[in-house]
Amino acid sequence: MHLPLGQFRAQLDALADAGLRVRELGERVQPGDAPSVVISFDDAYAGTLDYALPELSARHWPSTVFVAPGLLGSAAPWWDRLASPADGAVPTKLRQRGLTEFAGEESRILEAAQAEGWPLTPPAREHRIASEDELG
């Protein structure tokens, strides 16, 4: 995950304190139902499996993990490798270049990063993308 576990827990507590119901993705909302939310995660990060899902399971709350098949089992996506350790953001110029000039192709982006001295962050374990076996 991309935020400290304590902060994630506090966000879940805030949802509970607000009286919001956590629903399954696609669950129909009926007139008069209490306000509700759906919790979802992108890209099947290992941190989601290791930290977020156990927290949600302990609360008996459903969630959905969206999986990008092309990323399965990768060490960390290029955008996490280029993210600033201070704020987790990819500098706009680098992000634009990665998406436009290199069409999001990780190998080309990381080659350019190395050749041009772009700052790369070592992949954090929680930023690794889960494998197909781990998702099973």
Image (cartoon, grey):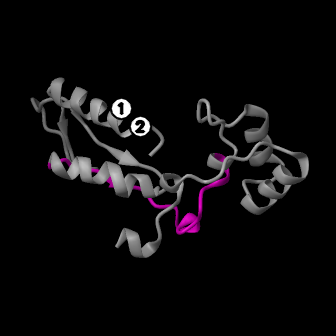
Q: Amino acid at mark 1?
A: Gln
- The residue at the point 65 percent across, 47 percent down is 79
Q: Amino acid at mark 2?
A: Pro
Q: Residue furthest right?
A: 115
Q: Are marks 1 and 2 in contact (CB under 8 Å)?
A: yes
Q: Quadrant of residue 17?
A: top left
Is 29 covered by the magenta stretch?
Answer: no
Q: Give the numbered dot on residue 7.
A: 1
Q: Give the numbered dot on residue 97.
A: none
- The residue at the point 59 percent across, 57 percent down is 76
Is 75 covered by the magenta stretch?
Answer: yes
Q: Is residue 29 above or below residue 44?
A: above
Q: Dot 2: within a 10 Å radius of its alpha carbon, few (fewer than 14), some, or many (20 or more) residues?
A: few
Left or right? Give the position of 100 relative to 42: right
> Looking at the picture, how far across and down is residue 3, in whole percent?
44, 37
Q: Quadrant of residue 15?
A: top left
Query: According to the image, label 2 marks what residue?
Result: 4
- The residue at the point 18 percent across, 29 percent down is 35
Viewer-proximal residue among 81 and 15? 81
Measure how far apart labels 1 and 2 are at the Cα level.
5 Å
Helix, strand or loop for the magenta stretch, by majority:
loop
> Looking at the picture, how far across and down is residue 31, in whole percent?
12, 32
Where the C terminus falls, by quadrant? bottom left
> Is disc 1 placed on a helix, strand or loop?
helix
**Magenta residues (range):** 60-79
